[in-house]
Amino acid sequence: MRRLKNIYHLGIKELISARYDKALMLLVVYGLTVLVYVPAANGLMELRNASVAIVDEDRSPLSRRIADALRPPLFLPPRFIAPAAMDQGLDSASYTFVIDIPPNFERDAQRGRAPALQLTIDATAMSHAGIGAGFIERIVQDEVAVFLYGHRVEPPEAAKLVVRAKFNPNLHDSWYLGVMMVLNVINMLSVVTTGAALIRERERGTLDHLLVMPLSAFEIMVAKLWANAAVVATAVFFSLLLVVHGVLGVPLQGSMALFMAATVLYLFSANSIGIFLATVARSMPQMGLLTILVIFPMSTLSGNTTPFESMPETVQQIMRFSPSTHYVGIAQAVLYRGAGLEFVWRDLAAVAGIGLVFFLGALMRFRRAVALAQG
């Protein structure tokens, strides 16, 4: 009972200290509002306002019909350029797509000669390049068919594909990016806040004050874990409700209670990693460098930016030992697909097991550091 009281009062001390740490509070608020909203609302991967230029060497009603079919919001109004300006426009990134309509295009189409158009793409704009080429191909085919036959040409019934998109029927990028950005910010905050709290105690000399008290390394460490986890978990809850669901309009399908329980469990793992790094680093700059080395793979290789299954097998096997990989799976299952505990309990167990390993490793190093300081 005494140990629990010590952990509770030490945690309250951490919360009071965090309250007066304006830089830390600003980081938490900024991270779970601006850093979530801006990429989700503006960092679109879908085709939107793509720039198009047309080299119209035919100057026929059909070529003008194709140009008129390239409309917002998919494409900006096309610009007509001379053939000599095509390469310069692509080199200067003025256009993502350049359509070259050859001479006699309409006449050859009417005579059934299947004339070819040239579509040149600036493939450095990856998100637009692949998707936009498909849209332009379909638009050209439809406009030529309507011009020649009076109706669009549909594929044969035997080959017709019926697409039904589940969980995100309109394929809004913001629905996906909003939640994933929250997870990225959690990775950053969970490691930084706990590790920085321990480094700050050491640099200010207040850790020495704690060591002369009848407190154990376990009590000091657990107090930092629960206090910093409480701050981040509270901020995550309001970020999901106010920013992701409220401002971005993302429907949160599953149980918020289940997701928040998984978040607290993940914060236990990530905060343990933060304390482990703090026992390795000797100063705040070293802590910052170590944090970058850890957070970057945790965020980019956990499956929240690209499908986990598309990564090399070796990378997949390594990242299964990261709690972030399992946490991303839980978040996607619960918040997107409305999954219950029966679908995510294995990932929850994995997060708990990995967190326990890092907790014990951090506790061993912290005890050693305390013993050296007291000796």
Image (spheres, helix red, strand yellow):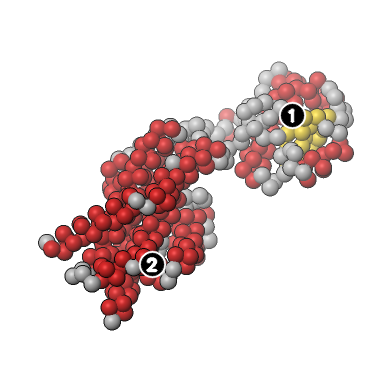
Q: Residues within 10 Å of mark 2 (few under 14, many from 20)?
A: few
* Residue shown at 80% from the left, 29% from the top: 80
How many numbered marks are there? 2
Q: Could you tell whether 38 is left or right of 266 in the image?
A: right
User: Which label is found at residue 203?
Assistant: 2
**Residue 78 bears which disc, if any?**
1
Q: Amino acid at mark 1?
A: Pro
At x 68% / y 47%, what residue is drawn? 124
SS state under label 2: helix
**Left or right, 274 with reference to 144:** left
**Is residue 196 visible from the viewing direction of this image?**
yes
Q: Residue at x 48, y 65 (%)?
A: 285
- Contact between labelled residues 2 and 1, with CB atoms less than 8 Å apart: no
Q: Where does the image place residue 72, in percent across and percent down from the top left? A: 64, 27
Q: Nearer the viewer, residue 24 or 289?
A: 24
Q: Earlier in the sequence, mark 1 or mark 2?
A: 1
Image position of 263 with respect to 34: above or below: below
Q: Position of residue 107 (x, y in %)?
A: 85, 25
Left or right? Give the position of 45 relative to 92. left
Specify few, some or many for label 1: CA neighbours under 10 Å numbering under 14, 14-19, or 20 or more: many
Which image quadrant is residue 138 in?
A: top right
- The answer to whether residue 276 shows anywhere in this view is no
Outermost bottom residue: 375
Q: Is residue 238 above or below residue 54?
A: below
Residue type, numbered disc 2: Glu
Q: Secondary structure at mark 1?
A: loop
Q: Nearer the viewer, residue 234 or 84?
A: 234
Above or below, 366 against 149 in this view is below
Foreground mark, 1 or 2, reads 2
Rounded to the nearest angstrom, the CA distance separating label 1 from label 2 is 60 Å
Give the residue displayed 31% in from the left and 55% down from the top: 17
> Horizontal and vertical percent for residue 371?
28, 78
